[in-house]
Image (cartoon, rainbow, N blue to C red):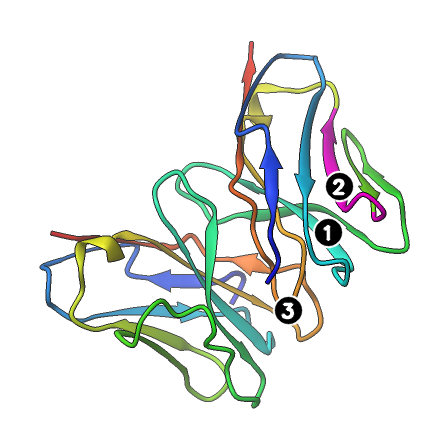
Amino acid sequence: GENVEQHPSTLSVQEGDSAVIKCTYSDSASNYFPWYKQELGKGPQLIIDIRSNVGEKKDQRIAVTLNKTAKHFSLHITETQPEDSAVYFCAPVERQLTFGSGTQLTVLP
Amino acid sequence: GAGVSQSPSNKVTEKGKDVELRCDPISGHTALYWYRQSLGQGLEFLIYFQGNSAPDKSGLPSDRFSAERTGGSVSTLTIQRTQQEDSAVYLCASSFIGDYGYTFGSGTRLTVV
């Protein structure tokens, strides 16, 4: 099955700085690469995704980049705000979403 | 409904008892998933229902765990003879078949004492 590794496990940034979270996967057949945000007491929420035929996708302050050759994809958040503080999960698809172990992002005011 | 609804939101049970967790997916979503999230961990896949096809049970950790989906809508996850290691948040998600943009419920926090 899919082996997913996510780094870092915790990340603290100053408000306004950028944050980058990286995810590596093992299944070369994976073709869908989403990122989920989970706030305390809630289920994960899809924030951005990318398919294998695209190298980068942006949506306002967030972006995802994909390197299929190296089998990794990254989440980029620019101009971070306190409300970005949450746990972020990558979840590349094998037969269903396979979640990474999560990154606790803390944005310091 | 407007979102995925799970009940109860919290459940405390004694070791050895059976529990049932309920998931009401978004109306029209034909795929339904159950995941388990232990404290501070990622999500562990349990089971996947896809329309009228046989469910993918490959993630169920033991034969104490079972799930059913009646009428292609509501799903129930049953854990028999609960153990302390079953304590976790159980999350349900739904989607259209072939759409990997899952919508998750808020989960059921199960505590086995």
Give the amino acid at mark 1: Phe
Residue located 75% across and 22% down the image: A78
Q: Does the residue at mark 2 contact the one at mark 1 (Cβ under 8 Å)?
A: yes
Q: Is residue B8 above or below residue B89?
A: below
Q: Is residue B84 left or right of residue B103?
A: left
**Residue shown at the point (75%, 41%) measured from the top left:** A73
Above or below, B102 against B37 in this view is: below
**Residue A33: assigned label:** 1
Percent position (x, y) of residue A69? Answer: 85, 47
Q: Residue at x 26, y 57 (%)?
A: B86
Q: Picture quarter containing residue B61?
A: bottom left
Relative to A1, is A84 above or below? above
Q: Say which residue label 3 marks.
A: A95
Label whose residue precedes the other's in the sequence (2 or 3): 2
Residue that carries the numbered disc 2 in the rendered image: A73
Which circle's residue, 2 or 1, is located before the other in the chain?
1
Q: In the shown orientation, is residue B18 left or right of residue B70?
A: left
The answer to whether dots 2 and 3 both sit on one chain is yes
Which amino acid type is marked by label 2? Phe
- Alpha carbon distance from label 2 to label 1: 8 Å
Chain to which the residue tagged by mark 1 belongs: A
Magenta residue check for B9: no
Q: Using the rendered image, report if marks 1 and 3 lie on a common chain.
A: yes
Pointer 1 and pointer 3: residues touching (CB < 8 Å)?
Answer: no
Q: Amino acid at mark 3?
A: Arg
Chain holding disc 2: A
Horizontal side of residue B39 vs B47, given as left or right: left
**Residue range highlighted in magenta:** A68-77
Viewer-nearest residue: B61 or A17: B61
SS at mark 3?
loop
Looking at the rendering, which quadrant does residue A75 occupy? top right
